[in-house]
Image: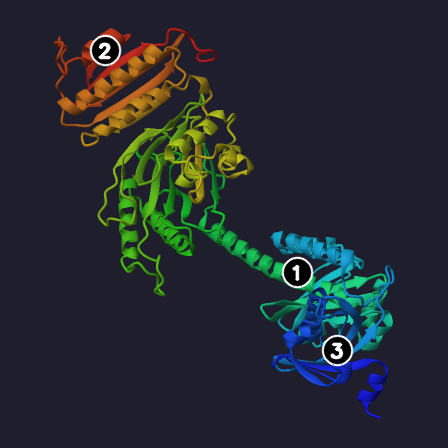
Amino acid sequence: MRTEDVLAAIATGLWRWDNASGIVSLDAEAARLLGLPAEPVRLSEAAVRSRFHPVDWNEIDGVVGLAVAEGTLAEARLRIMDERGRVVRTVRSRSKPLIEGSDYQLVGTLQEVADPQPGTAGPHTPITGDWRRSREAFLLDAGRALAEARSTAEVLRVAASLSMPGFSPDGLAVFGMSGDRLTVIGHHGQQDGDEGPFTSMSLRTDYPAAEVVRTGRAIYLPSPEEYRRRFPTTWPLAEPFERQSWAFVPLVVAGRTMGAWMAAFKHPVTFTPDERSVLTTVARMLAQALARAGVAESERELSLGLQRTMMPVLGPGIPGIRVAARYVPTGGGLQVGGDWYDMIRLPGGTEGGTGGAGRIALVIGDVQGHDVRAAALMGQLRIALRAYASEGHRPDAVLSRASRFLYGVNDGYDGADGAGAPGGGPRFATCLYLEVDLETGTVDIARAGHPDPAVRMVDGTVLLRPTAGGLPLGIDADADYPTTRLTLDPGETLMICTDGLLETGGHDLDSGWERVKRLLEKHRGDDLEELADSLVEAVHGPGSHHTTGPLADRREDDIAVLLLSRLPATTVRQTPRRTLMTIAQAEPERIAEAREQVRQLLHDWTDEDQLDAAVLMVSEMVTNVLVHTDGDALLTAEVACGEKARLLRVEVSDASDELPHKRHPGEMASSGRGLVLMEMLADAWGVAPRGEGKTIWFELTEPTEPEGCCP
């Protein structure tokens, strides 16, 4: 008797599905079960699909994919529909994939079965109703949790916490590869050290995980007997864990098997197609999460390595000062960019040649861009600056040479990188270079398109110190960089930073400076590390959204900040509050900066009228120098504590020997009012010859003593 006749006698049909051609061949009984005439027929996949309930078709499609991937039996229950969409019968399908290269054929049987009654669903019943919803909810939650994991340790913690519907494992292990050896990436449900025998195991070992990595196919072991039968050599390693069932599933990314995932159960699991489908789906998500975590960890390691290489260590050992610094890369990519800072011990002693505490240079800069090339240029520029500084050049000469160096580096770029890609054109850099005499506190500053430094005085007053400057480095090979000098008194703190500290959070330079200024003023104590942390936290931490600026859509930037403080003297409270700046003949616009400096210096002055008078007199004094002489004006303003109250003294010096004369300007006169105003507004004033030049000065005494000002 023919096989077909035997199968027909027990209401079982034969079918063959050719995946390459999409043709399904049915014998007579299989055709009858599908509601077609009882005769052999060849149909398209779409014609056969129309006979199945759509929910069941989707399920069998997943089961078939699993069977093809694992080389196992595909089994499912399917509802047959008529032309009106009514269920006419339920059949059980069993099929075996025959794989030929990338194509495959399914050969199987169809057999009619009784419709299951409520509560009597067997192990091979299609996933419907609550079970389906439970599985889908579980996979959705698992996918979300694994997608959010940012490190291998987080991925493993998520995998260990997954509660699979109806068959949660109590032991997990993730295996990877190192050459031809099997490694344990992580495990859960075992004691530390239990992974020892499985670490560095040869891939040729007769062990389930090794075979899965070699073949890329899952292995399901529903019982200890099955484990012992298939893997007798390594069964003694698994036996002490007293598990009843095991699933070893490949971890595949982009078609490449990168490892294996073991799920072990203390209760017996039959590993139905539904259960295998869940395990396979979780394994795919786990593999993707591990791959992402591995890339992220490699990027972080590279980023930290670059940062450690390029950022100096500001260690102890320099007498009389404290130093703190922070570097925070922007959030994207490798988290490397063009910002940097440096501290350089300079050769020789102080200017007088007496040795003493010596001199140091502070450097902070920002190379254009947020990519690896910016970081590479930053490294080159930092080395060049160190070399020029170590040769003993003054700040202006150091920046001039550095600009010429970067201009030469840029000379070979024409708007494309070495591979012809756009965006690799010339890059410029901003830079602030300070030479600090540790004995006298004098600071000589050269600036190349960079934000100005700020000084926090002993009493908490914070001033932005305007300095002369030149073009950013690398734009002009012959650029000049004038030098500005200021004095850092004992107990005062100098802050230099890149524009990222000011502009992060959508601020521009002005609104960002006001935010940073408030932070500096609020700081108490002399802990520079704490101050550095608070500056970065306020603009880059969880609470920074409270200070979002008007340009909230702008891209975030790298942040570099460097703080230097001279150790306070024993009589800190008597240290005067002082500012000094030069206004050149070619820079009349800096008169506004001079007025603002005086306002900041007198931010807590009690008499507003006196404050306005001081600003007016400063404006007149500086303007007179620029109008009536050929030289620059040097402004010095100092607030000191007298016997009972504070005293403001302002001096404006120039190189002209011609002394000012008091005049009586008419109503329409445009000049001649300076000395008249000083006589009316100042408590004291005068003009003093000073070698080659003169100094005009005035004083104001605060009428009421501010609390805690003077001893």
Q: Name the residue under label 3.
A: 95
Q: Earlier in the sequence, mark 1 or mark 3?
A: 3
Q: Is residue 320 above or below residue 294?
A: above
How many numbered marks appear?
Answer: 3
Q: Distance of mark 1 from mark 2, alpha carbons?
A: 79 Å
Determine crowd level at label 3: few under 14, some 14-19, many 20+ residues with C-alpha closer than 10 A. Answer: many
What number is the disc on residue 286?
1
Q: Is residue 201 in view from this perspective?
A: no
**Left or right, 270 with reference to 555:** right
Eyeballing the image, is 684 above or below 464? Answer: above
- In space, the residues marked 1 and 3 are separated at their CA atoms by 29 Å
Nearer the observer, disc 1 or disc 2? 1
**Residue 114 image offset from top left, x and y in percent:** 85, 70
At numbered mark 2, what does the secondary structure look like: helix, strand or loop? Answer: helix
Q: Is residue 559 above or below residue 336?
A: above
Q: Which of 74 and 527 is in front in this view?
A: 74
Q: Nearer the viewer, residue 162 or 326?
A: 162
Nearer to us: label 2 or label 3? 3
Q: Name the residue under label 2.
A: 678
Q: Residue at x 81, y 80 (%)?
A: 12
Q: What element carries label 1?
A: helix
Report the front residue among 298 and 313.
298
Q: Check disc 1 and give the amino acid type.
A: Leu
- Is there CB contact under 8 Å for labels 2 and 3? no
Seen in the image, is 431 located left or right of residue 109? left
Q: Nearer the viewer, residue 527 or 45?
A: 45
Q: Few, some or many C-alpha atoms within 10 Å of disc 2 (few <14, some 14-19, many ≥20)? A: many
